[in-house]
Image (spheres, rainbow, N blue to C red):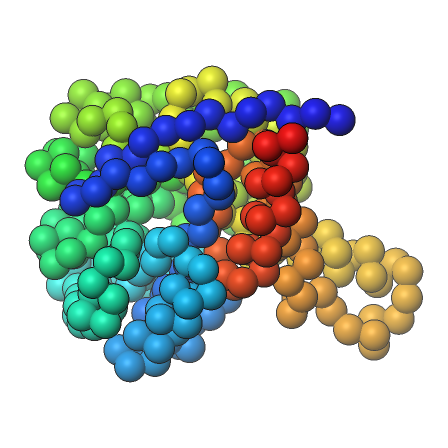
Amino acid sequence: MSFALRPYFDWCLRTRTVALGPRTLIMGILNVTPDSFSDGGQYFDTSTALNHALEMLDDGADILDLGGESTRPNAVPLTPAEELVRVLPVLQAILAARLDAIVSIDTYHAETARRAVEAGAEIVNDVSGHLWDDAMSHTCAALRCGAILMHTRGRPNEWRTLPPLESDEVIPLILADLKARSHSAIAAGIVRESIVLDPGFGFGKAFDENYPLLAHLDQLHTLGFPILAGVSRKSFLTRTLNATLLSSRSAAEGSASSSHAPTTVANTAAILAGAHILRVHDVRPARDAASIADRILTN
């Protein structure tokens, strides 16, 4: 078996340029929320969030992705003012402790993006691909920051009622939508070299709809942008493994939900398909998996 060479890019951020391709970059997730699906409430206060951020950096995170609003189904939306109260103190604390840290702000609010980048964030990571705030693309263009455009199908409160996709519909839909989002961002003034695309695992894709996306992730390279993959702790992975465990032995032997294994396997598959960045909750196992997968890609 052979794997296609991962394309190289120079990603233009607010104050620096980052090489994408020579090795996989690890983006550590830092949710300062009380209600995120996987880690809500764990890092809600500034001190705890800072300690976790420093731990992730020490474990090998290249980027920290700081978010103040949960996008789980039926989560309560925040105003930009409420979001900023959560994220700005943490952002300032991180940059005071580690001047060279690269921080991404995870938001779909243009005002939050502007204030965070002005406070030192290098990247805006928008789960809506700039669809939920009409000012986002022009704001990112003016800020000259890195821009991650993610594919989301519908809004979180609609995900459970969306019509299902056939396996052969998943990739064409995502390709068409991300092509449209990237063209719109460039038309608004964002330079092409600042854009990274994220296909949005789990965001409006029902459980089994994520597997065709992971299996054919390499097709996103036809769009000509770097790729970020966020499969960390996704329920479609643990659902598959738990079903396997239940069919093979007693449920009393435990669940796969606390294991790093499902995420590690999916992360490795994403890298071998050409993902440039992994967005993860657990930095060290992702860093270890990337070290091995990167060696495979270079041979």
- Say whether residue 25 is left or right of residue 239: left
Which residue lies most toward the top here? 222
Residue plotted at (54% across, 32% down): 274
Tell me, yes or no, if residue 130 can be seen here: no
Percent coordinates x, y for residue 210 in the rendering? 60, 40
**Image quadrant containing the N terminus:** top right
Residue plotted at (12% across, 50% down): 114
Of residues 28 and 34, the one drawn nearer to the viewer in this rendering:
28
Percent coordinates x, y for residue 194 in the rendering? 26, 33
Of residues 13 and 180, the one drawn nearer to the viewer in this rendering:
13
Tell me: residue 290, above or below residue 97. Answer: above
Tell me, yes or no, if residue 182 can be seen here: yes
- Say whether residue 61 is left or right of residue 238: left
Tell me: residue 191, above or below residue 48. Answer: above
Percent coordinates x, y for residue 17 in the rendering? 25, 38
Residue plotted at (34% across, 58% down): 64
**Where is residue 218, by image quadrant?**
top right
